[in-house]
């Protein structure tokens, strides 16, 4: 279901009435979960009086072609009324939504989702509409008590109290016992997570049924690949009477943060077609219990029998459904409208850039977004004029205090309304404006992380298809410059900084050069860099320290805004893996270089007993991003990217013993991290294993010294 509520914060347009719609239904059944077809969704929702969106069916080549032609014609100026009218005219079947979009949401239309369906869908849909007419609205005028907004307004400062009040107002038939939510300890218990080791214990436990086995497979893959997702576990208060040390019951909440996770998970599904599909978020009841040997043997036998039966059923079933291959039946495309994207992506998601980096950086941001979308030249010109005016207006009004993204429409809608009144062209550009619901009176303090889809993280664009080494000449000579290194120890950043400092003329202009080496700097390094830049903002700073994460990148962005500087990330060139921007060959070379060092100022050299562990720790900091995602994010943030050559294109594959020792180290690192977090390897329960691995690492790399030297591009 999708929640459309003003209480959750601003999106493309504040809804006039809070509501929810069912967007998809999946049935677990036996084997792999299956999505309902569109007729099945309509049937299910009408049977159970659940709300649905407007659905149009295009069953001929002519109508399907007309649909995409209509979108192409309306995508830059389309709003709810003309879009719905156009689709009603060309669709073979039109199924109105449970609620009129204009009445409950307004004219700003986020977009459409197009889904390939079978030829039989039109017959099935007509049958569903005959059997399940639109439900009557009997009792629609009865008093249902206070509205969502009334409840939230009465408990505005406390989100937990809002939850309690909501449960009280829905009545005892829906929530007969608040202990299901809060346990015996009352309201404060609601936020308490169970032990973080629940996921580890769950993955190690023997599954008693097929669904558990497949869920373990899914979660295990996501943990191994470091996908951007959270796995939170709460005590299951409904089972509180049966809890004991040998029988633990939890509710696990799985939330996928990033859209990129789905792309990577689909790649894994192509390799292993038995994987279950992944969803944005779901809840799972988990029961961990101890069984005696006899009971364990029975459970193992039962689950193995069930698995064989299901596999047999799957093998004997047809490989396609209704004439569609599995991958076709799940193929969907999102088609969003520009009037929505103006508000959500260009205005809301551009706020941080506008207030931190100024109008010039904001213009770069929104022009890049429009280029990615393929916005027409005429609309780009109109939007540039409008967004530049918006930037001046909102910065003048708020000065240095950033406008909150959760209530940005309080300022954006009045501005857009006034802008639209100036001309019919402006009105078409804006779509609709001025119909504003006052959210501030009932919006709770939101502390949840916001993700990409919906009201969360900004949509990331992509870097150029093949980002090339960018010349530092693209940076204005009237600004300062920060050169920094999202790398790993051994990537040659200090050697490069030294070469730049020793080169007559530096980077070829008159700006003074200054290098700050992390290994020789005491205290908080990035604060020292910021302090030095405030003293001389127009010089070039070589930040000779690894900058491996987004927290550091944000600090660098802040420095750029405060000292009118540009920043250029310099990265080692590497193909990367599906979950890390650096390849195993690159990691092996970095380790080899570090273990050749003598008297390193940071004590990371051949004499360091934990050198291999430290390199693995840095490597793991980048885990969860493919090379393309890594480069795209840096390019998005800083507008340029420089690559240092590292490995020769024509090279022999990584020797087996080198790959094995790296794989062993990464497995040991994951075990150590899950049990001891950031504790030094010598202080954990794997101290002996670490010592042995470090010795073997040195032997293996030494044995392959000729190979590791030969594959490097000479510095």
Image (cartoon, helix red, strand yellow):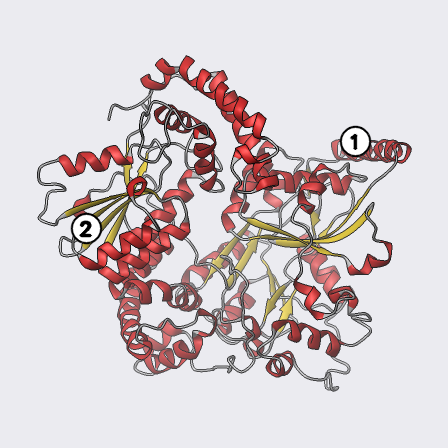
Mark 1, other Cα within 10 Å: few <14 / some 14–19 / many ≥20: few
Camera-side residue of 40 and 563: 563
Residue 206 located left or right of residue 298: left
Mark 2, other Cα within 10 Å: few <14 / some 14–19 / many ≥20: some
- CA separation in Å, label 2 and label 1: 63 Å
> Residue 487 at x, y = what percent?
36, 38
For residue 130, say whether it is visible.
Answer: no
Which residue is found at the position 48% from the left and 35% from the top? 578
Camera-side residue of 95 and 308: 308
Q: Nearer the viewer, mark 2 or mark 1?
A: 2
Residue 305 located left or right of residue 629: right
Q: Which mark, by number, is residue 678?
A: none
For residue 500, say whether it is visible.
Answer: yes
> Residue 387 at x, y = what percent?
30, 69
Disc 1 is placed on an element classified as: helix
Residue placed under numbered mark 2 in the picture: 475
Q: First in sequence, mark 2 or 1: give its number.
A: 1
Residue placed under numbered mark 1 in the picture: 312
In the displayed structure, would residue 391 be above or below residue 618? below
Residue 426 is drawn in which quadrant?
bottom left
Camera-side residue of 689 and 90: 689
Quadrant for the N terminus in the image: bottom right
Disc 2 is placed on an element classified as: loop
Which residue is found at the position 28% from the left and 30% from the top? 645
In the displayed structure, would residue 352 be above or below residue 598? below
Which residue is found at the position 43% from the left and 79% from the top? 410
Quadrant for the C terminus in the image: top left
């Amino acid at each position: 279901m999708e929640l459309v509520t003003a209480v959750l914060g601003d999106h493309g347009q504040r809804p006039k009435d809070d509501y929810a719609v069912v967007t998809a239904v999946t049935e677990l059944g036996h084997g792999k979960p299956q999505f309902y077809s569109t007729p099945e969704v309509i049937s299910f929702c009408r049977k159970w009086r659940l709300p649905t969106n407007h659905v149009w069916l295009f069953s001929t080549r002519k109508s399907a072609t007309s649909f995409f032609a209509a979108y192409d014609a309306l995508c830059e100026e389309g709003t709810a009324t003309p879009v719905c009218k156009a689709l009603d005219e060309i669709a073979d079947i039109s199924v109105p939504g449970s609620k009129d979009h204009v009445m409950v949401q307004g004219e700003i239309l986020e977009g459409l989702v197009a889904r390939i369906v079978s030829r039989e869908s039109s017959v099935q849909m007509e049958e569903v509409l005959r059997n399940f007419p639109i439900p009557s609205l009997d009792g629609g005028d009865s008093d249902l008590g206070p509205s969502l907004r009334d409840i939230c307004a009465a408990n505005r400062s406390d989100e937990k109290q809002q939850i309690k009040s909501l449960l009280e107002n829905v009545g005892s038939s829906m929530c007969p016992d608040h202990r299901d939510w809060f346990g015996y300890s009352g309201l404060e218990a609601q936020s308490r997570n169970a032990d973080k080791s629940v996921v580890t214990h769950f993955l190690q436990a023997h599954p008693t049924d097929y669904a558990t086995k497949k869920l373990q497979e899914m979660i295990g893959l996501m943990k191994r690949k470091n996908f951007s997702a959270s796995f939170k576990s709460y005590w299951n208060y409904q089972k509180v009477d049966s809890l004991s040390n040998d029988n633990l019951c939890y509710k696990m909440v799985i939330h996928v943060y990033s859209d990129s996770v789905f792309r990577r998970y689909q790649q894994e599904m192509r390799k292993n077609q038995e994987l279950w599909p992944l969803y944005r978020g779901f809840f799972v009841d988990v029961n961990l219990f101890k069984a005696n040997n006899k009971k364990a043997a029975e459970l193992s036998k039962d689950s193995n029998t069930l698995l064989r039966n299901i596999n047999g059923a799957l093998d004997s079933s047809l490989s396609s459904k209704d004439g569609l291959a599995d991958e076709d039946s799940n193929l969907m495309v999102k088609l969003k409208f520009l009037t929505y994207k103006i508000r959500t992506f260009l205005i809301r998601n551009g706020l941080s850039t506008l207030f931190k980096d100024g109008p010039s950086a904001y213009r770069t941001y929104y022009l890049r977004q429009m280029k990615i979308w393929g916005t027409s030249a005429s609309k780009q010109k109109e939007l540039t004029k409008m967004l530049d005016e918006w930037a001046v207006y909102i910065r003048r009004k708020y000065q240095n205090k950033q406008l909150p993204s959760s209530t940005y429409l309080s300022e954006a809608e009045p501005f857009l309304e006034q802008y639209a009144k100036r001309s019919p062209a402006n009105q078409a550009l804006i779509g609709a404006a001025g119909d504003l619901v006052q959210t501030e009176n009932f919006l709770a303090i939101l502390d949840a992380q916001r993700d990409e889809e919906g009201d969360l993280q900004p949509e990331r664009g992509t870097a150029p298809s093949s980002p090339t080494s960018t010349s530092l000449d693209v940076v204005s000579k009237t600004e300062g410059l920060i050169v920094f290194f999202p790398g790993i120890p051994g990537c040659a950043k200090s050697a490069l900084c030294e070469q730049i400092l020793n080169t007559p003329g530096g980077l070829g202009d008159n700006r003074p050069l200054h290098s700050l080496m992390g290994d020789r700097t005491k205290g908080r390094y990035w604060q020292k860099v910021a302090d030095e830049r405030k003293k001389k903002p127009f010089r070039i700073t070589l930040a000779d320290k690894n900058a491996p994460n987004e927290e550091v990148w944000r600090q660098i962005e802040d420095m750029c805004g405060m000292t009118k500087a540009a920043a250029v990330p310099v990265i080692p060139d590497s193909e990367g893996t599906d979950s890390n921007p650096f390849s195993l060959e690159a990691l092996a070379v970095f380790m080899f270089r570090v273990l050749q060092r003598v008297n390193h100022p940071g004590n990371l050299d051949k004499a360091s007993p934990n050198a291999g562990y430290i390199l693995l720790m840095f490597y793991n900091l980048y885990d969860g991003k493919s090379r393309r995602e890594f480069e795209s994010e840096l390019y998005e943030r800083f507008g340029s990217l420089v690559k240092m050559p590292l490995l020769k294109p024509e090279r022999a594959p990584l020797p087996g013993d080198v790959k094995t020792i790296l794989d062993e180290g990464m497995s040991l690192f994951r075990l150590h991290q899950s049990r001891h977090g950031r504790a030094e390897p010598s202080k954990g329960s794997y101290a002996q294993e670490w010592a042995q691995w470090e010795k073997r690492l040195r032997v293996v790399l030494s044995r392959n010294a000729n190979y590791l030297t030969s594959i490097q591009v000479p510095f």
